Image: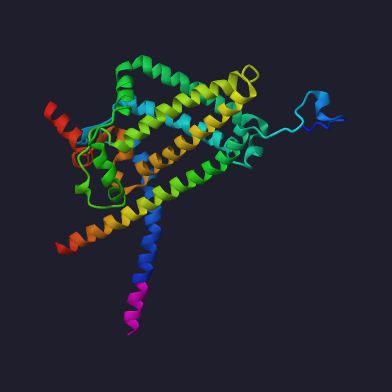
Amino acid sequence: MQKDEKDEKDEKDAKEKGFWASIFEPIGNIIATFIHDALFDDPGRPGVRRFSLQSRAFHWTVAGLVILMGLTGLILFVPGWGAIALTGWTRIIHRICAYAFGIVLVLYFISYPKASLAFIKEAFTWKKEDIGWVKAATDYYTGGDENKMPPQGHINPGQNLWQLITIVCGVIFFVTGAILCFAKGAVSPGVFQWSLFTHALAFIIGGCMFIVHVLLGTVHPRMSESLRSMITGKVSEEYAKSHYGKWYEEISSQQ
Amino acid sequence: MLYILDEKPEVYDLPVDPQMPAAATALNVGEWAGVGLGLLAGAGMFGAAMIARARMIEKKEEESAEG
């Protein structure tokens, strides 16, 4: 009898630990993936090339700048946090990152015009079969049957939406940001105030999508090789087949 | 900075009945709405990840039990 009670207690303890482990394990996984894949990944590891070196370098440069702009923007945005920005450094960092971001975008576009235009074209291309992804998405991203998701191309409609939002919000940020930075006094107070509001609106939309993008790429078990692919450029063949079936078929037929 | 007017606003060419600009009101609402939406997006995605994790583990256990 006592033994049964002990077993039950051990089982309960293990379950509780499992719950906490399930929360902390993804965080450990993210750190380990960064360290391992950035430093110790075997370049000869079998897999499918998904992202080129220049697109990964661009991604992480932009990510760093966006995170800095986002954090400094958040200080200016969240009600009650404004006191942190009183020294003026928040605004300075925000603007320096915005200038750097602009320079990086222009340099990348000049260096890789074909890839840049393909990115823009991809973001604005929507197909009828995307409805299949939308229908299957809720069940798929909550761990449902993987086979119910129709095969996807190089990016799925969710990623397509993210690309579209980065472009649209990026344009809004630059236009309204330029008015806020350089046109104070030159434009009417109404235009200035609405620019500030539109800048904030783009921050809300882009920020929410950024949170979804980061969590999907890091902690979501369905996108288990997503972070890895953005560090090493490669995914396993199984992952490519199950997540981007159409794209995998395309590249396989080309080889 | 706070200005105290000695005379009535019209003496200084200021509006008699000043109103909060619509853009400023919209920004105030947007700030709180933005904070709420951001937290909702984070919690929703994190929740979906946890549910997916639990369901995937369950499915794996079922498959291994079936052999």
Above or below residue B6? Residue B28 is below
In the figure, is residue B26 to the left or right of A32?
A: right
Q: Residue furthest top?
A: A110
In the figure, is residue A95 to the left or right of A129?
A: right
In the figure, is residue B14 to the left or right of A148?
A: right
- Residue beneath the point at 35% across and 66% down: A14
In the figure, is residue A251 to the left or right of A67?
A: left
Q: Is residue A9 magenta?
A: yes
Above or below residue A114? Residue A17 is below
User: Is residue A224 in view from this perspective?
Assistant: no
Query: Residue A61's image quarter?
Result: top left
Q: Is residue A195 magenta?
A: no
Magenta part mainly helix, strand or loop? Answer: helix
Whole-percent x, y for residue A137 in the image: 29, 45
- Residue beneath the point at 61% across and 19% down: A187
- Residue beneath the point at 38% across and 61% down: A19
Query: In the rendered view of the protein, which quadrant contains the N terminus of chain A?
Result: bottom left
Q: Nearer the viewer, residue A62 or A37?
A: A62
Whole-percent x, y for residue A38 in the image: 35, 35
Query: In the rendered view of the protein, which quadrant contains the C terminus of chain A?
Result: top left
Whole-percent x, y for residue A40 in the image: 31, 37
Give, as a single range, the part of the protein colored magenta.
A1-10
Q: Residue furthest right?
A: B6
User: Is residue A10 in view from this perspective?
Assistant: yes
Whole-percent x, y for residue B38 in the image: 48, 43
Above or below residue A238? Residue A88 is above
- Residue beneath the point at 34% across and 47% down: A220
| Coloring applied to the structure | rainbow
Q: Nearer the viewer, residue B12 or A219?
A: B12
Query: Residue A51's image quarter?
Result: top left
Above or below residue A102? Residue A31 is below
Q: Nearer the viewer, residue A159 or A19?
A: A159
